[in-house]
Image: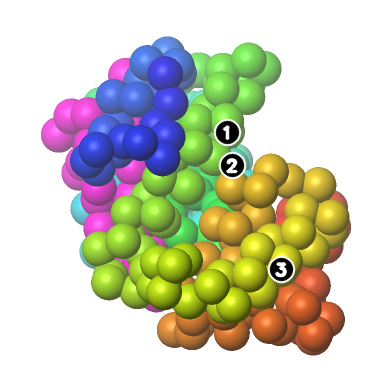
Amino acid sequence: MTPDESSPGPVEAEVVLAVVPVAGAAISTLGGLLGSETISASDDVIARVDELQFDLGEGPCWDAIATGRPVLEPDLRGSPSRTWPAFSRALADSAVAALFAIPLNVGPLRIGAIDLYDVRPRPLEGDDLARAVAVAADVSRTVLRQAIEESGLEEAPAAARPRSRRRIHQATGFVIAQLDVSADDAELLIRARAFAEGRTMLEVADDILTRSRRFTIRGGEIQDER
């Protein structure tokens, strides 16, 4: 069970728990693009984890969004691989024994993270990690689409701007060829760049069509080259 374009309302943390066997999950946006906010939390424990990270400006979700990669702490109390001084102290008496942050990425945009916790030390690996990363990809698209819709920055209907939409369609084809992604993901990437830069999709599409901007994959990540 994963969110999709037809989701009628905000994505819920329970969609993550349906595929990843942990005690709790939270979905949050982070940073300047969408602001820092918990969209959904499955319980008070993980909601508090998010709140502490927002307040203190440190923790696994910040590391995940900075690197674009999962941050995994299977034994937060006993033998953590990294420490966050204030955040770790604040969690000392909590029920959190294992803590994981999976970034929410849409192409080169890093918009937030999914935090997962368990009450006993345990790794997140193999199929569980793969499912967490897969659901994060779906959640990322849903969260960004909803943010764009709520912002009022949607493009005019195709019938109102036929030539503009044709250029966007052409640019989508360029992105498909550059990245070998679906048409929906290619268009979402153009939409996301427009949203992030406060521009229109047409302006970003023209960058792509004039080859002043292209997308490549390096080290398994989408890079935006201008």
Viewer-closest of 148 and 26: 148
Image depth: mark 3 or mark 2 in front = 3
Q: CA distance from mark 1 to mark 2?
A: 8 Å
Q: Which residues are magenta?
A: 23-49
Q: Which residue is mark 2?
A: 70
Q: Earlier in the sequence, mark 3 or mark 1?
A: 1
Residue at 42% across / 35% down in the picture? 4
Q: Position of residue 21 (x, y in %)?
A: 42, 13
Q: Which numbered mark, 3 or 1, is in the foreground of this view?
A: 3
Q: Residue at x 36, y 64 (%)?
A: 148
Disc 3/disc 2 C-alpha distance (Å):
31 Å
Number of the front mark, 1 or 2: 1
Left or right of residue 107: residue 152: left
Circles 3 and 1: CB distance less than 8 Å? Answer: no
Q: How is the image coloured?
A: rainbow
Check disc 2 and report its element: helix, strand or loop: loop
First in residue order: circle 1 vs circle 2: 2
Q: Which residue is mark 1?
A: 133
In this rendering, would 54 be left or right of 125? left
Q: Which residue is mark 3?
A: 171
Q: Are marks 1 and 2 in contact (CB under 8 Å)?
A: yes
Circle 1 residues within 10 Å: few <14, some 14–19, many ≥20? many
Q: Does 126 sit above or below residue 204? A: above
Q: Residue at x 59, y 42 (%)?
A: 70
